[in-house]
Amino acid sequence: MVSNAPVAGVGPDALSKKKNNAQDDVETSDIGIEPAPNYIPDDEEKDGSEEINYHTLTWWQAGVVMIAETVSLGILSLPAVVANLGLAPGIVVMVIMGVFSTYSGLVMGEFRKQYPWVESFGDAGEVMGRSIGMGKLFQEVFGWAQTIFQVFVMGSHLLTWTICLNTLTDSAACTIVWGVVGLAIFWALNTPRTLKAAGYYSFASFASIFTAVMVTMIDVSIEKPIGTTSAEVSRTIGFASAFLSVTNIAVAFSGHSCFFSVMSELKQPNDWPKALMLLQVCDTVLYIVASVVIYIYVGPTVPSPALSAAGSLVVRKVIWGIAIPTIVIAGVIYGHVAAKYIFVRVFAGTKHLAKRTTLGVIGWLGITAAIWIIAWVIAQSIPVFSNLLGLVCALFASWFSYGIPGSLWLWMYYGEWFTSPKRIVQFSLNALLMLVGLLLCALGLWVSGEAIAKDSGTEPWTCKSNAAK
């Protein structure tokens, strides 16, 4: 029988096995999914090309990789968010979003435990859609939406890169030129096919953003002693401004689009909860401490990104220099996950996915180059950091971090929602996740679109410096 399993669900491991492996077929059938089309002719298996091992991450490496891709940009917008909302509302919203994002990550882990071949939201969508005869449609919508989201985040990293370079060089070159330089660097670092290297250089990324934020906090506390600025416990502001701040907090916890891919590269899949808790404890504590301290010392004029809050230009340059690894590495991680999804779709069912072949290498390099060029276009088109993050959250993070994980649980336990007190509580939580995703999407699109339309202080596709004055 020819399998009709989804193309995107054809993981690298499946493709390295024979179609006539009866044991594999039995194991796959046990979870209710037909085996993926993984036939590889004998002559192709013996061609001497190098086998690629995709299961390389320990739980702590996976946690550090996720910290690197989640904390980098998220933390840069939060001091300005607290300044806009006030201390109490800002902290409360961060804690709530942290709890929601932790629970939704656990739900994703539970889903993948039931369907271990899932490597992306496209695969997850296919599983849900198959029950109503719309598996392929769900796969395309979820999978490509995930990829588009990651390309937008890559654009945010390129935008931050241009701000960094303009700050370090006193705007010595055109902003577009700095974007092209960043494009070349990010693409070059995206040439490896697995996240194994990222498990190590993500330490540099985390150390980078942690040190940069610490230096910023120390500098602002020295330059502006407490009491010289006004910090408000709460503020009365317009709805649009307040909700845009909420979307910036939501995007700070929006690493979920990479979660399935990270799970698929774990040496021990059951270690996922440990990796997730390492991420969530670190990012929530760091977000709250950094945003509150910087806001208290800088006051309502704190900029976004927050690294520009340092008093003197020299210190500001030092801080941005320290932040370069996290700006680059976190962007590269998103680039890897986006490229991997496209690569699997293009080369599914061939030896090029599981082995290092010439065509496979050329395909990988071409795909990574293409998505970084698109990210560069986005960065030049939406030059305001907080507005770009708000738009990204509204369009995508609202669903990948909150709405879709909620729907995954509802689908897994359909018919069992009210069978016990525990199930009723879980049903309520996941229904709330879906509601949060819907509100973030609908209202977030409105407020971010309004902010982009009203922001006349910056121009797209310009050589003008975007560094803080």
Image (cartoon, helix red, strand yellow):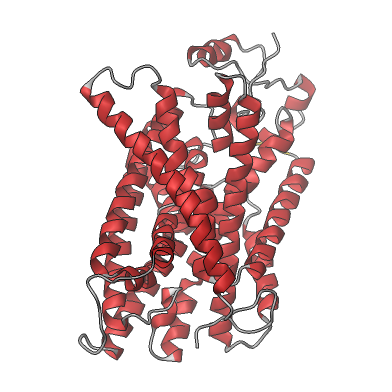
Give the residue displayed 23% in from the left and 65% down from the top. Answer: 88
Instruction: State the residue at coordinates (66%, 68%).
Output: 381
Q: Where, by quadrant of the figure, is residue 223 drawn? A: bottom left
Q: Does the image show residue 328? A: no
User: How many badges with numbers are in the image?
Assistant: 0
Residue 145, picture quadrant: top right
Query: Residue 434 in the image: x percent, y percent?
Result: 41, 39
Relative to 259, is 341 on the left or the right?
right
What residue is shown at x 42% (from left), y 48% (from top)? 61
State left or right for residue 361 relative to residue 271. right
Res. 194 image quadrant: top right
Q: Position of residue 458 (x, y in %)?
A: 60, 79
Q: Position of residue 290 (x, y in %)?
A: 31, 69
Residue at left offset 40%, top offset 81%: 309
Q: Does residue 103 appear left or right of residue 29 in this picture? A: left
Residue 126 visible somewhere in the drawing:
yes
Residue 90 vertical position relative to residue 298 in the rendered view, above or below: above
